[in-house]
Image: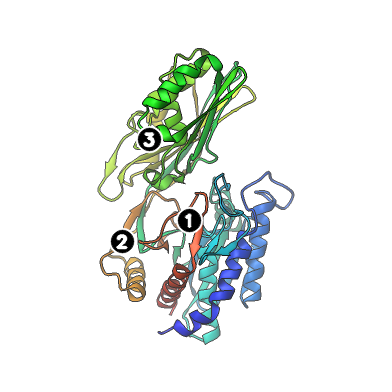
Amino acid sequence: MDFKKQIEAVMEPLAQDISALCQINSVEGEPQPGMPFGEGPAKALEAALALGERLGFRTENFDNYVGHIEMGEGEEMLGILGHVDVVPAGEGWDFDPWGGVIADGKIFGRGTLDDKGPLVTCLYAMKILKDMGVTLNKRVRIILGTNEETDWNCMAYYLNEVKPELPTIAFSPDSHFPVTYAEMGLLQYTLTREISEKLEIEGGNAFNSVPSKASVVLDAKHTEALEAAVAAYVDPDMFVIEKADDKVILRATGVGAHAAYLWEGKNALTHMMAVLGQLPLEGELKEVVDFVNTHFGTCLYGENMGVACSDDDCGPLTLNLGKINVEDGKLVLCCDSRIPVAFTVDSIEEAVKAKMEGTGYTYERVSTERPLYVPKDSALVQTLMEAYRTVTGDTESQPQSSGGATYSRTMDNCVAFGCLLPDQVDTMHQANECLELEHLKIWLEICLEAIYQLAK
């Protein structure tokens, strides 16, 4: 079915509605009455549901954990699973991360790619089908979560407390095109030790983001050795040294990236630790630096932690040191691993626990997610592949695996589908996250074709 005329007619309001939703800072905050993940995610959910109502759909809010936007009739249901929460903005933006600025043919803002932009795109695809009076045999329901970027308690509440009717078939527009048929298992954990000395070290802002910034304050007596270590480092341009009275500050700038694709980034924290490892440090700072360099280093695949493994579908396990935090006498390292589907989360967890024995660090699990695997020859995967190929003409791209963790793995017969195109720059979880309007049009056409094919 040719939707091009209808697509052209909605491009401007679609862009404006994405911009408006991205203007809500929906980073998870402290729980408040009626707002289980803080004010921001609740506001974003309410705004998304209000948009659904304005476009003529049925909506429902489940205690600000999850919401529904639904159209159509029928016994079977097509589900579209996404989220309205986002990771922190971080530093280095050229535009206000909460401004939803439309400039230079792009929408700038946290959430434009992950996942507000894709959700609003699917909502407008539903609007076009409704306005055209297209007959569908399935209901179409967008399911909106509110803390996907942390521990998925929104989906736990939805599945275990709400206990809704589940979709017959579903996809999550929270990854890449074409289709992600396999998602690696997820294990997020902290490593914590007691600290009695004053340590001024920081870096990163989330488990699932590669740190783009890190810093440490040292005694000025290390200035000469620090300058020599930076000059000799493989990439000295990552570092800036600042002198202040009896202190010297080392600041590292890396490249942010989503932990699922950590090879696309450069971890400012682990590279800073590598430089510090060349200094004649003392006390607890030396112990921390030695620990990080021994167990993480600048490698990406868990070699130093003793958990390296790989399979044919997903490739190697990844290990991201996403954040270091010193507070209330404790140092906390926040870690994120993506685990190939041939291996269990439990086996990796046991290996990390064993590695921590005798180190003085306490292991604590923060979050786990089971892997996802839907056969490449299934009707779901093949229908989505055909929708993608019909719109793009791309016959070369094949179903793929991913380290990304989407809501797809919470339900049967569900895969990740879009919305990042193969030739589209990935700025998810990075400064200047943005969505090109030319790509937005392709997103809409693909999602429209997919919803039509799956629900007709």
- Disc nearer the start of the sequence (3/1): 3
Asked whether disc 3 touches disc 2, contact meaning CB atoms under 8 Å apart, the reply is no
Whether residue 427 is situated above or below residue 132 in the rendered picture: above
Relative height, residue 381 to residue 147 (above, below): below
Name the secondary structure under disc 2: loop
Quadrant where the N terminus lies? Answer: bottom left
Task: State whether residue 136 appears in this view.
Answer: yes
Mark 3 or mark 2, whichever is nearer to me? 2
- The residue at which mark 1 appears reads as 407
Residue position marked by numbered label 2 in the rendering: 399
Q: Which mark is residue 378?
A: none
Q: Which residue is mark 3?
A: 348
Sequence order check, earlier mark of 3 and 2: 3
Q: Position of residue 104 (x, y in %)?
A: 52, 65
* In this view, 341 is above or below 332: below
Query: At 60% across and 69% down in the image, what residue appears?
Result: 16
Q: Does the rendering let one see residue 355? A: no
Q: Nearer the viewer, residue 420 or 54?
A: 420
Question: Are discs 2 and 1 less than 8 Å apart at CB?
Answer: no
Real-space Cα distance between discs 2 and 1? 18 Å
Q: In the image, what residue type sits under mark 1?
A: Tyr
Identify residue type, mark 2. Pro
